[in-house]
Image (cartoon, coloured by chain):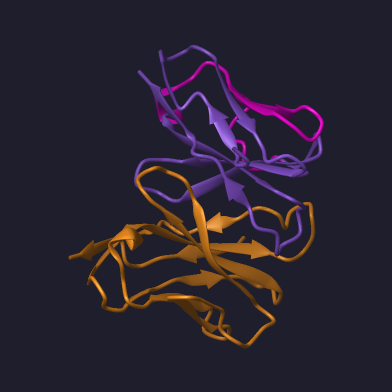
Amino acid sequence: AQTVTQSQPEMSVQEAETVTLSCTYDTSESDYYLFWYKQPPSRQMILVIRQEAYKQQNATENRFSVNFQKAAKSFSLKISDSQLGDAAMYFCAYRSARGETSGSRLTFGEGTQLTVNP
Amino acid sequence: GAGVSQSPSNKVTEKGKDVELRCDPISGHTALYWYRQRLGQGLEFLIYFQGNSAPDKSGLPSDRFSAERTGESVSTLTIQRTQQEDSAVYLCASSLGAGGWETQYFGPGTRLLVL
């Protein structure tokens, strides 16, 4: 079974600064997808960024980028120019590419609570 | 409103009572998922529907939990004889298909408190 670990329960950053959230995962599969979701106090889970394991190029979405190290099974999220609206719980998630039966579920880490200080 | 909706938003019940939680997916989404989030923890997978069949229900924690889906529309998660450990936020998500790349869109969840 796959597992996802986020070793930082809480992180804080000053507004306009850069912060990196860590995520590691364990899998025996070679093809899979990785995601970062954001959960503000409203509880709504919002997709921030995603990465296909077979792509070596790191994904980027505006101020959000990832550092994907497949051999190390590491998938960190970098937030540049942090804004007050970035404050939320961030979850790293894994999804198998095996197929539509058992490959569809997302496996989540425990989350990192990000505080942005003005 | 084109997003995933869930009802009720909050539910307080007494131990031993049955509860039903409802999820309305995005129109046209064939895949639907239920997750549970205990306080301060990540999401745990419960069940996945493709259409109205459930290829993967391996995450249901006990036979007190069941779910059904009508066609490619509404899903209901039922918890019978609720226990205090069932207290959590129950989140529903839907996606256009069930491929690994498909984005799962989440609803706001139902917060269940069992007294």
Is A49 magenta? The answer is: no
Q: Quadrant of the C terminus of chain B?
A: top left
Q: Is residue B107 above or below residue B97?
A: above
Instruction: Residue at 67% x, 70% y: name it.
Output: A32
Give x and y (percent) for residue A115.
25, 61
Q: What residue appears at the point 60 percent right and 26 percent down from the top-left corner?
A: B22
Looking at the image, which residue is at 65% across and 73% down? Answer: A28
Q: Is residue A84 left or right of residue A58?
A: left
Front residue (pair A81, B13) = A81
- Seen in the picture, residue A75 relative to A7 is either above or below; the reply is below
> Residue at left 73%, top 66%?
A97
Q: Is residue A108 left or right of residue B47?
A: left
Q: Nearer the viewer, residue B84 or B8?
A: B8
Question: Where residue A75 appears, x then y in whole percent?
Answer: 49, 76
A96 and B2: which is toward the camera: B2
Q: Report the residue that reaches farthest toward the front.
A: B1
Is residue B52 shown left or right of residue A3? Answer: right
- Asked if residue B13 can be seen in this view, the reply is yes
- Where on the picture, by quarter, is residue B34? top right
Q: Colour of chain A?
A: orange
Does the magenta segment cover residue B73? Answer: yes
Give the image location of residue B41, x and y in percent: 39, 48
Residue B61 visible at all: no
The part of the chain drawn in magenta is: B57-86
User: Which image quadrant: the N terminus of chain B?
Assistant: top right
Percent coordinates x, y for residue B8 in the rendering:
50, 23
Give the letter of the purple chain.
B
Is residue A63 shown left or right of residue A18? right
Above/below status of A89 relative to A33? above
